[in-house]
Amino acid sequence: MESTTPIDRRTQEQLSGTKLRIAEAALETLKTKGFAAASAREIAAAGAFNQALIFYHFGSIEKLLLAALELVSARRMGAYRGMFEQTQSLPELASLAREIYADDLKNGYVTVLGEMVAAGVSHAGLGAEVVACLQPWVDMVERKLRELLAGSLFESMVPPRDVAFAVIALYLGIDMLSHLEGNRARAESLLDLGVRLSPLVGALLPSQRAKRSR
């Protein structure tokens, strides 16, 4: 099972040793079999350990699957936060979003996110936890939007928090629909469209015009 990208300190403290091994098995099960089939038996088989360890370390399958989602989020954040914070234009952001999607698809993270978001709709307690896990991404997008919109006409017109939420929701929605359709071409086409249109939108921002005139 893959485990490459560094995870943040909080997640590393919570998931290490046996707990990390169990979370990795849960992650692999979500990728290959989905939420509905992620039973203790399937997860234990994926990790080659006794299923009693799941309940000893996590208490329930639901808590384990949330830990797997946090592991995915922490790895994605560790891989992309630096690049995201260094972007200085909408075209750079659009290209990075395209790169993140490709990497998520390659590593199976798109499937994990889609499975957990879909499960959160029908499982009352799970939904709030899934949303909480996504909040760091909303926060990061919001900070970048405030930075890019500063000094522009849009600064007073566009609520960065709402737009950041919409960006994350759109990303997840596109993924879930393309997953149901069984074809990623439409999602990739929309992301490519964003890359092509971003220079036009970026031209309306004073900060972007200033960068080009230097």
Image (cartoon, rainbow, N blue to C red):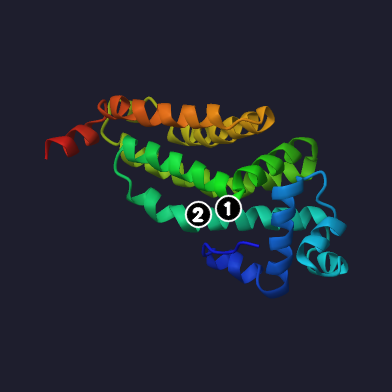
Q: Quadrant of the N terminus?
A: bottom right
Q: Residue at x 44, y 44 (%)?
A: 99
For disc 1, the neighbor class at 10 Å (few under 14, some 14 to 19, many from 20) is: many
Tag on residue 73?
1
- Give the position of the C terminus as an image quadrant: top left
Amino acid type of the residue tagged 1 in the rendering: Ser
Find the residue positioned furthest to the left.
Answer: 214
Residue 97 falls left or right of residue 57: left
Label 1: element kind: helix
Position in image of residue 121 (x %, y %) = 74, 35
Q: Where's residue 66, x and y in %?
A: 71, 53
Asked if 49 appears above or below 60 in the picture, the reply is below
| Disc 2 target residue | 77
Residue 60: image quadrant is bottom right
**Residue 86's mark?**
none
Pick the front one: 46 or 171: 46
Residue 9 placement: quadrant: bottom right
Q: Which amino acid does label 2 sit on?
A: Met
Q: Is 111 placed above or below 1 here? A: above
Residue 126 versus residue 4: which sits nearer the camera? 4
Viewer-side residue, 41 vs 158: 41
